[in-house]
Image (tube, rainbow, N blue to C red):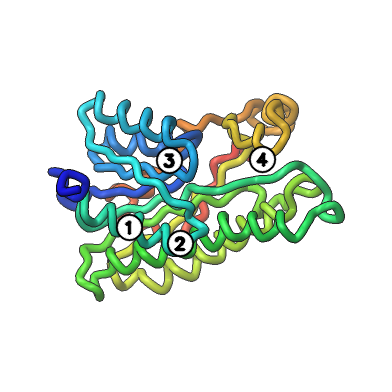
Amino acid sequence: MAELYRRLDVAAGKVLLVTGGSRGIGAATARLAARHGWTVAVNYSAQSLAADEVVRAIRAGGGTAISVRADVADEAQVLRMFEHVDAKLGRLTGLVNNAGVVDRAQPLAEHSLARWRRMFDINVIGTLLCAREAVRRMSTAQGGAGGSIVNLSSAAARLGAPNEYVDYAAAKAAIDALTIGLAKEVGGQGIRVNAVRPGLIDTDIHASGGRPDRVRELQAGVPIGRGGTADEVAEAIVWLLSEQASYTTMSLMDVSGAR
């Protein structure tokens, strides 16, 4: 137990938590952030082996990382996750709210209440919970050193995702509103808050929604003629985390190939 809570040696001011960091955009962000000097906590809900593989890759490249399990929709688990990061890595200065879900492509008339509960519990409540805990640690008004929060929204927030994921689009529109409001709320406390809105990105989230070939099917409708990659989205996220983006807050950055 003593080993579990032994704090690791980390670079001052470079402690990052990536929720949903075991796959896709989250995993790409964790790996890239580590290459830019961040010490990374890789959150996962169920895919422990995938999260451990991300941690191993970071350590193999000379970085520092840990994995930490939590369902972001469960407040008690979120609190324990942040306490674990505090104990192992020190005070948080970066958060990427990446954890999220879609469901099967269906028109709204076929949706169930259970689907909506899951959609909003994970995509919205989970983001709110993690943002709250991050602010409590980063805010200069509460003894923190400031920091950066990057929320994962989606191009669906402005496209609406008709006949597919209207509920997902609505949840991501809530993330846009959160980003704008929170950026204004904590801008004077040393915290920047931005969102990245990926478009058609080639990750396995489409398979979880029952359409594993969705990118191939729809990429002809993307003005630049292809789907994007998780690594391309990660580049935008890590830039927003960085000091190079020191005057950028309240932005909703589209990474969508003009779709």
Indicate the amino acid at tag 3. Gly
Q: Say what secondary structure mark 3 lies in.
A: loop
Q: Is tag 3's residue or tag 4's residue first in the polypeptide sequence?
A: 3
Q: Say what secondary structure mark 4 lies in.
A: loop
Indicate the amino acid at tag 4. Arg
**In this figure, which residue is indicated by the disc labeled 4?**
259
Asked if disc 3 and disc 4 are in contact, CB closer than 8 Å, the reply is no
Q: Is tag 1's residue or tag 2's residue first in the polypeptide sequence?
A: 1
**Residue sitting at x 24%, y 56%:** 86
Residue lying at the far left of the rendered structure: 9
Image height of 7 relative to 117, above or below? above
Q: Which mark is residue 21?
A: 3
**In this figure, which residue is indicated by the disc labeled 2?**
250
Where in the figure is residue 99, as x and y percent of width and height?
Answer: 50, 48
Q: Say what secondary structure mark 1 lies in.
A: helix
Left or right of 127: which side holds 83? left
Image height of 118 relative to 200, above or below? below
Q: Could you tell me if residue 11 is visible in this image?
A: no
**Residue sitting at x 25%, y 24%:** 60
Indicate the amino acid at tag 1. Phe
